[in-house]
Amino acid sequence: MSETRLSSATTEVVIGFDRPFVIIGERINPTGRTTLAEEMAAGNFETVVADAVAQVEAGAHMLDVNAGIPLADEPAILAQTVQVVQSVTDVPLCIDSSIVEALEAGLSVYRGKALVNSVTGEEEQMERVLPLVARHGAAVVAISNDETGISEDPDVRFDVARTIVARAADHGIPKEDVVVDPLVMPIGAMGTAGRQVFRLVRRLREELGVNTTCGASNVSFGLPNRPGLNAAFLPMAIASGLTSAITSPLHAETRTAVWAADVMMGNDPHCATWIARHGDAPGVGPAARRRRREGRRRSPEA
C-alpha cells in the first residue's frame, strides 16, 4: 500500500490508504485575506502564529504555508513564514507556491521532509519543479492539469496524473512521494463535480496506487453554508479513496465528519480516537466496558 511519509524536525505524518485521513490546515494563505497579506508583507507574523497554533489545536496534522502576495518578495516571505511556523508547531508543512524560486527558498530553510505544493503536467513546470523536489528529498502534490488547462473530463485528468507520476520517477521520485490532486470543481457550477472526483480518486488509488489530496472547500464555492457542504463531501471522497485534503479544521462540521469517516473506514481501531475526542457515550464508559468483558468471560449458569 502506498504511504507518503512527511516530517518536521521531530514529528512524522503518514498519508496512506489504510491510515487515518490527514487534514492539512489551509489558513496560512494571504489570498483573499487583505489584512493578513499586509501583515506578512510588513514582516508581521502574529496572525500567522495564531492561525498555525489554532489549526493544530483543532486537529490539523499538517499545515499549508502560502505567501502569495502581489508585488511582494514572495521567496523571502515564504522562507520566513516557514521558519516562524516551525518555531511554534511541530507538524510537517506543505510549502505552497506557483513560483519555483519561492519553493526553493522555503525548502532551503525547512527542517524535515516537506510536501511541495505543487507541480502541474505542463512540460516547463515539471522540468523546473521535479528536480527541486528530488534534490530536497521532498514529496510533491501533482495537479492534474497541463498546457491545455483543466479538462472537464476526469479521464483526461487521470492521464495527466499518470504522466506526472512517470516523469517524477524519471527524476528518482517514487510514486509514494507523489500526492495527486484530482482538481475539485465547484458543485454549484458543475452538478457532476462530486461524482467526477469520486470516480477519479478511485482510479488514482486502484490503477496508479497513489495518495490523493485536494482543496476540499472548492466544492462549495459560491454556495451558502459552505462548511455543511464540505462536511458532506469529505466522507464521500474518503470512501472513494481520498487520503488527505487541504481544508479548515476550525469548522466543527468538517473535522467531525473526517473523524467519523475514519471510524467508518476502519482506520480508527476500536474507535479509540473518536472516544478520546468525544468522551464515553452512556453505557459504554470504562465500568460498562469492564462488565461486558467480564460477562463474556463467564460461562452461562446451568
Image: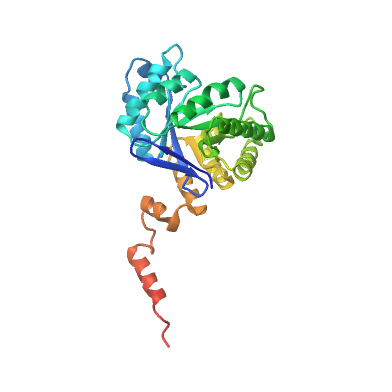
Residue 247 horizontal/vertical position (percent): 47, 35
In this rendering, the answer to whether 100 lies above or below 163 is: above
Query: Would residue 46 be found to the left or right of residue 118 on screen?
Result: left
Q: Which residue is situated farthest in the bottom direction here?
A: 302
Q: Nearer the viewer, residue 278 or 11?
A: 11
Q: Position of residue 141 (x, y in %)?
A: 52, 32
Which of the 4 image quadrants contains residue 156?
A: top right
Query: Horizontal and vertical percent for residue 95?
Result: 44, 28
Relative horizontal placement of residue 302, taking residue 197 as reference (left or right): left
Where does the C terminus fall, quadrant-wise? bottom left
Q: Which quadrant would residue 145 be assigned to in this image?
A: top right
| Residue 152 in view here | yes
Who is closer to the viewer here, 76 or 283? 76
Residue at left 34%, top 26%?
83
Residue 225's x, y, as percent?
Answer: 51, 35
For the point 64% across and 21% down, which residue is it? Answer: 147
Can see residue 33?
Answer: no
Q: Nearer the viewer, residue 225 or 213?
A: 213
Instruction: Identify the coloring.
Output: rainbow
Q: How many marks?
A: 0
Instruction: Kindly identify the residue that appears in the image at 64 percent across and 23 percent down.
Output: 149
